[in-house]
Each structure stands twice: as C-alpha cells, then as structure tokens.
Image: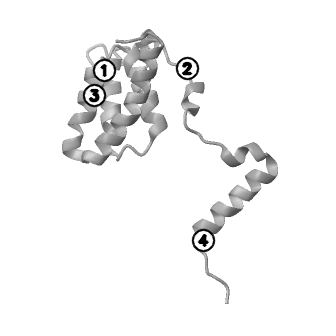
Amino acid sequence: MTDPKNPFEMMMNQAQEMAKAMNPALESFSPKGFEKLWPTMPKEFMEMSFGKGASKDGLDAKTRLLLTLAGLTMLGAQSDTQIRLTVRHALEAGATKEEIAETIAQMSMFAGIPSMTRAMDFAREVMDESEEKGKDK
C-alpha cells in the first residue's frame, strides 16, 4: 500500500521539481528582500497621489501610511513585503521610528502580541537598514 500524501504537499513537491528543472538556482530562491526592487516614492509624490492631493482637508501621506501599517499588523502581519514597503515609505513621508513603533504596538491590543511582534521585526529590519544608509529619522 502506498503512503497517501496531502494534495498540497504533492503540489508543492511538483512545483519544486519544475523549478529545479527550469533553473537550478530557483530551488533556493527566497522572495525576502524582493521589495527592494520597488523604489521608494518621494514624499511629494506620495502627498500628491494619496495624501492631501486627494483632499486638501484630508489625511496626509504619513498618516495614511501609518494607518496602512496598522491594518497590515491587524491582519496578523502575514505580508512581510508589504509591511517593509509601508515602513520604508512612511519614513520617507516623515514618520519617525517612534511613530512607527507606536502604531505597531497599539495594534497589540486588537491583533495580539504575536502579530505585533512579527510586524515590529519587519519594521526593525527596514529602520536598521535606513540607519545604516544614514537616513536616520
């Protein structure tokens, strides 16, 4: 009798075999850091696109990005790429490291400590990186 396999496991094994056959380097490919290929938008462009450019009496880009970060944390911080991109753009829009940390910490009340911790780990990666580049805000 054969050992029954989980259909998802079979699908993943098949995908890994296909990746190996197409390009052996894909076997160890990790999408982590893939977001670095996406440039950081200038603060002025963010303001024009989804800050006060949309509504002069509305939220500025920094506040919108902090709200986005809160929402991503509330979802369980499942999307590391989006969290890192949002933190990077929030810094560019004028958010301080303290504001980013407070935004994520506030979500612990609603999303739980594990989500907050995970989001904070991703945010720290970006903030440490920006510090190394001399963009400490």
Which quadrant of the view contains residue 90? top left
From where the camera sits, is residue 106 visible? yes
Graded by Cα atoms within 10 Å as few (under 14), some (14 to 19) or many (20 or more), the crowding at tag 1 reads: some
| Residue 97 badge | 1
Q: Which residue is mark 3?
A: 101
What residue is rendered at 28% in x and 34% in y?
104
Amino acid carrying mark 4 in the image: Pro
What residue is rendered at 32% in x and 38% in y?
71
**Image vertical order of residue 22 relative to residue 15, above or below:** above
How far apart, in angstroms, are the residues tagged by discs 3 and 4?
40 Å
Q: Which residue is mark 2?
A: 39
Which-is-in-front pick, marks 3 and 2? 3
Q: Are marks 1 and 2 in contact (CB under 8 Å)?
A: no
Q: Earlier in the sequence, mark 1 or mark 2?
A: 2
From the top left corner, tell me how far across and down residue 42 is, in percent.
Answer: 47, 12
Graded by Cα atoms within 10 Å as few (under 14), some (14 to 19) or many (20 or more), the crowding at tag 3 reads: some
Amino acid carrying mark 3 in the image: Ala
